Image (cartoon, coloured by chain):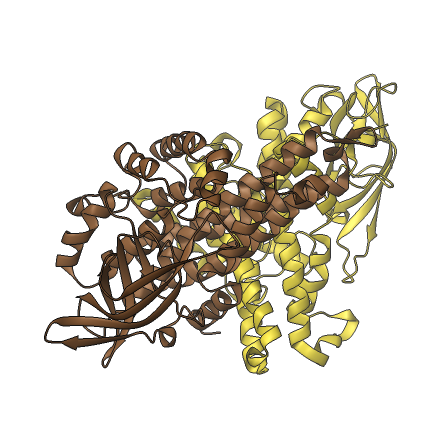
Amino acid sequence: MELDFGPAVRDFRDEVRDWLADHLVGEFADHRGVGGPTDGAAWEVRLAWDRELSAGGWLGVSWPREYGGRGLGLLEEIVFEYEYARADAPYRATVNALDLLGPMLLKMGGEEQKKRFLPPILAVEELWGQGFSEPGAGSDLASVRTRAEREGEEWVVNGQKVWTSFGVHADWLYVLTRTDPDSVRHKGLSLLLVPTDQPGVEIRPIRNLAGQDEFAEVFLSDARTGADMVVGEVGQGWRTAMATLGIERGTTLLPQQLTFEREAEALIDLARERGALDDPMLRRRIVDAWISVRIMRTTNLRTLAELTAGRTPGAQATTAKLYASTRHQQLGHLAMELAGPAGQIVGEDYGLDTRQRSFLLSLAETIYGGSSEIQRNIIGEQILGLPKEPRP
Amino acid sequence: MDLTFSEEQDELRKVVRSFLSKYSDEATVRRLAADPRGHDRVVWRRMAGELGLQGLAVPEEYGGTGFGYVDLGIVFEEAGRALLCGPYFATVALAAEALQRCDDEQARRDLLPGIASGETVATLALTEDDGRWDEPGIRLTARETAAGWHLTGTKTYVPDGHLADLLLVAARTPTGVSLFAVAADASGLVRTPLPTLDQTRKQARLDFTDTPARLLGTEGTAWPALERTLATASVLLAAEQVGGAAAALEAAVDYARIRVQYGRPIGSFQGIKHKCADMLVEIESARSAAYGGLWALDSGDATEIAVAAALAQAFCSEAFTKVAAGTIQVHGGIGFTWEHPAHLYFKRAKSSEVLLGGPSYHRELLATRLGI
């Protein structure tokens, strides 16, 4: 598939391609395709790669120049992401700040906050972690119990967060807190920026099922941050957080889909090597796997085309995540079956090959970013207009 | 690259939907389903005269308006929503397409304008008793005499074959598969309507005994054109299936919002809500499959068309059946009655699933075309 949006964008695309061809070499090339939303592998190499990207001016393609971005449009951003995924470059270590916090600050942040935080993000000088989820809350973000109280010119934060992706590396956290102690659900919340380099913040890694320190739990005990570290308005944290999640749902599917396409191609090669293509049952599942990734591609193209035409994306923009996550897991099961007995063996120190890692990590795709069950509620209630469940 | 609908295309959809809500409402669908002919000539003329739907994708030089396949796909999607009864699929997706693909300029000039104007109802007779949609399945023989070509044999499962004015017939000559045009009143032709499970799309059996026919294009070379025709028809049928599935889901959702059980609307129960959500995921995925096919057709890239068409049929035919069955489930007992329209969608879904060869056949076509 070629994305073609006309001559001006074509020049930009060639520039991206050339740069990637020149710089995705050596150690970086050895780590092609490494990483992912739930994969903390090869952290140092990937951080170095982010710095390389930064030096080339490729971080924040659509961010304004005054904050260190390139000041280009959505089209260029899409073309860059597409070429990046096509080149199978390492997954960006600073994705939390680039894809979530940065766009949120651009949308909801104050001028001082943008000047203070955006340039260091693009320079890969400060890493960020997300403090939304809490123990026992799962997908129910509105049940936030972490509290923040105003004390003079500071906020004092107490509580616990969990599932903070790549949290052990974070210099700062953006944290959803309850600032009105008498409030319930999504009212009375505020989004605070909290530095981790202080006695009140303790971060402990959590190992995921693939054996990696992917996320962390965060303990906040009288952690302090400045009064000016609220993003958006005090008490309006839910709106701010939801704006971030909207961004998250829109940006991750294209690179994922390209990864899935590569996996489907590899699966067909593997099946051919093993002579499995003659087995009618396997053959059917292989064709279905191919159909799935092709449908993901067209679905994403539909959404991209609508976005670039300035239209509101249709229902497929919401259904895409559920479809992709479910189908990717099926693809993983099939790949493991085709691998046969060799699929049971891992390397030293629980070293996984690409297939094993992708298969195991795919289990998280129906959980993070809103579980499949939450996705079905969103589709049912927001897209189809079905009545909400009675809530206590 | 234009992968989103233009304002004109949105307008086309609106116009067609509004037309069909009037002329293909449930009462009309039921009346035509019960009628052995299943076709309303007046509405057919209006479709051509007022909206130009039969000639939408026929080039202007042959009396059409020369729009693209994406536009035609919009019409098929709407026709599927409305369960349009009548020979639209047979005439436009099969016959008009076969004429455009065959290597016979004179035949195009002679036959396409009648289709575009709504004068001619046409169809393609390809399948025989074993229901095969591939080249070896064509065994009906054509013989050349001093008086011209004559056909002998049987075609069956021919969509709207009982009422078509013009029959395009795939037949075998000593040099291979050829395409012939046969007039409805040709001698030695017996047409028998077949009672169909899906009463909204009629089929017929055609028996030929030394029936005079006109050879279209060069003898023995018709298969590639027919293959391409079937690819196009697969994509247009996929669009029709998406429309049918979308209408079926809407009915389920409307019902789930108002039907109260255990003190609250059933749509508020996750068991129902999640089922409806899964049906929408299925439909949006099917929509991508069908639209991907339409874009491929407009691109004209033969390899891409072959792949996208097989994919669209393999996926969309199953998706429509799943959604239509889900709709009956959401409706509960009432959905299982003759009076409720849910079964009309379910039967259309199940029949159109096998109309052009069935999901397993299309998966195999896809695998072959991908070199798997």
Instruction: Name which quarter of the figure residue B129 lies in.
Output: bottom left
Q: Could you tell me which residue is drawn at 83 percent across and 16 percent down?
A: A152
Query: As rendered, which of A199 and A172 lies closer to the eye?
Result: A172
Instruction: Name which quarter of the figure residue A181 lies in.
Output: top right
Query: As rendered, which of B348 and B61 lies closer to the eye?
Result: B348
Q: Position of residue A209 (x, y in %)?
A: 79, 60
Query: As rendered, which of A246 and A149 lies closer to the eye?
Result: A246
Relative to A354, residue A218 above or below:
above
Residue B264 horizontal side relative to residue B330, left or right: right
Query: As rendered, which of A197 and A354 lies closer to the eye?
Result: A354
In the picture as drawn, the residue positioned furthest to the right comes out as: A221
The total of numbered circles placed on residues is 0
Residue B173 horizontal side relative to residue A215, left or right: left
Q: Position of residue B249 (x, y in %)?
A: 60, 40
Q: Could you tell me which residue is drawn at 64 percent across and 35 percent down?
A: B253
Q: Could you tell me which residue is drawn at 62 percent across and 22 percent down?
A: A110
Relative to A346, residue A90 above or below:
above
Q: Which chain is yellow?
A: A
In the picture as drawn, the residue positioned furthest to the left comes out as: B146
Q: Colour of chain B?
A: brown
In the picture as drawn, the residue positioned furthest to the top comes out as: A152
Q: Is residue A85 visible?
A: no
Relative to A129, residue B19 above or below:
above
Q: Could you tell me which residue is drawn at 10 percent across and 75 percent down?
A: B146
Q: Is residue A25 visible?
A: yes
Instruction: Name which quarter of the figure residue B173 lies in.
Output: bottom left
Q: Position of residue A325 (x, y in %)?
A: 65, 53
Q: Position of residue B133 (x, y in %)?
A: 41, 68
Relative to A71, residue B307 above or below:
below
